[in-house]
Amino acid sequence: AADIPCSAYRSSWSQPRIEWKFQKGSSLVLFYYGGELTQPYKNRVQFSPTTIHFNTVTREDTGKYICEVVGDNNQIAKSEVNLIVQGAAAPQPPP
């Protein structure tokens, strides 16, 4: 499991709009948008304004998570977290 904080979140903003993006190499995936998680994250991620919580992570989840918060007067705050998932080595069969 992993928790990724959104340090851009401002509790003083009355109805902030929150978007999460996942960047891996040159591809950018919308992760949380318009108030909901996108597929394929829906089933294994829990969203709260300050954190996204992965129930399970794999090496595929390694990359940069960008949290963008848009406030009432279109102020934008942004934070980024790099997640590195170290996969366990496959167990070696006994000789």
Image (cartoon, helix red, strand yellow):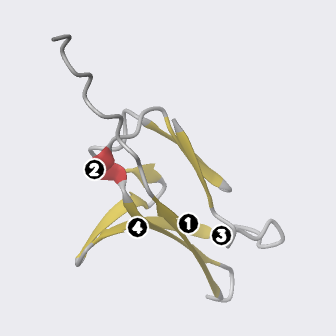
Residue at the spot of label 3: 16
- Dot in front, 1 or 4: 4
Quadrant occupied by the C terminus? top left
Q: Nearer the viewer, residue 52 or 35?
A: 52
User: Where residue 58 is drawn, which disc sits there?
Assistant: none
Q: Is residue 23 visible?
A: yes
Q: Nearer the viewer, residue 84 or 36?
A: 84
User: Where residue 60 is drawn, which disc sits there?
Assistant: 2
Residue at the spot of label 1: 18
- Please rate how many residues cluster around mark 4, counting C-alpha atoms within 10 Å: few if below 14, some from 14 to 19, many from 20: some
Q: Is residue 86 above or below residue 5?
A: above
Please state which amino acid type lies under the numbered disc 2: Glu
- Dot in front, 2 or 4: 2
What percent of the width, then of the height, locates residue 37?
41, 49
Rendered residue at 54%/42% (across/down): 2
Rounded to the nearest whole Å, what is the CA distance between mark 1 and mark 4?
10 Å
**Mark 4 or mark 3, which has the lower sequence index?**
3
